[in-house]
Image (cartoon, rainbow, N blue to C red):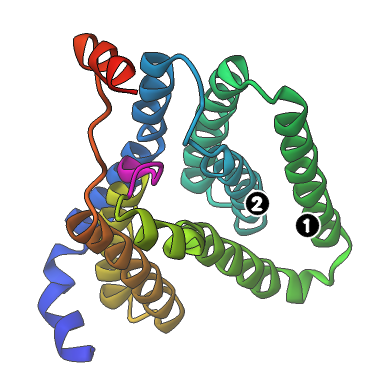
Amino acid sequence: MDALADLLQPYKEIVGTLAAVVTIGQMFSGSFICWDIYKQGNTKGIGIMPFLGGIIMSVLNLKYGYILRDPTMIQVNLVGLALNIIYVMVYFNYAQEKMKVWAYIGLSGAMSAAVIGYAEYEDPKLVENRLGTIITAFMFYLIASPLFGLKEIMEKKSTEGLPFPIIFSGAIVTFMWLLYGIILRNSFLVIQNVVAFVLCASQLALFVVYPSKPKPKGKEKVKAKKAD
């Protein structure tokens, strides 16, 4: 890793800037999912967890940013929090089972409050590493969560319902932060993003093996109904 770090060292500023830019860009990937929801008029086949997960990650990283006194991290996650709140509002507007959505929102809020409460009472000397570990574990869970439905994907031979924009942008973001971690010679950052990148790449491979089936439109829908 040292040899690669030396090779990339002259590009530290460029890689760092690109990593920040693609991270902010990833936060807008949810707009593509919201557009799909708008086009089909409901949330069928689309889960809310990517958006709620985005809110939880933004809240936790905001707290982490305050602990580190890092203004860039604070600003980026304020943007992420605002965008994901908008995405959840769009999802809720088109959701049919609104009580179920409320339950998920309440659970996410309770989880965020619990972790923030823990961070407030933890020893200041320990909270940075421990909160960082919690955030990393939750990030891995979010990235890996689409794989929980792998059995269903294999049975249907379709990736319909997987959030492709979020997965694709996640792969780019984790790769850029992996490079930045190598430049910084930060083993924690490298391991974190190696795992995250592998998870994203595995999910992207599913889109190649099991492409989502296009939904019938207009006349095709009418023909499909007549056939039934």
Figure quadrant of the N terminus? bottom left
Q: Position of residue 212 (x, y in %)?
A: 26, 44
Viewer-nearest residue: 80 or 52 = 52
Q: Position of residue 122 (x, y in %)?
A: 84, 68
Look at 28% across and 21% down and name the residue there: 227
Residue position for label 1: 115
112 left or right of 23 in image: right
Residue ranking furthest to the front: 227
> Which mark is on residue 64?
none
Q: Quadrant of residue 16?
A: bottom left
Question: Dot 1: within a 10 Å radius of its alpha carbon, few (fewer than 14), some, or many (20 or more) residues?
Answer: some
The three-letter amino acid code for the residue at tag 2 is: Leu
The residue beneath circle 2 is 60
**Residue nearest the viewer, comparing 18 with 33:** 33
Residue type highlighted by circle 1: Val
The part of the image, by quadrant, that contains residue 221 is top left
Could you tell me how far apart the alpha carbons at marks 1 and 2 are, in whole angstroms? 8 Å
Above-or-below relation of 150 to 82: below
For mark 1, give the secondary structure: helix
Q: Residue at x 61, y 40 (%)?
A: 52
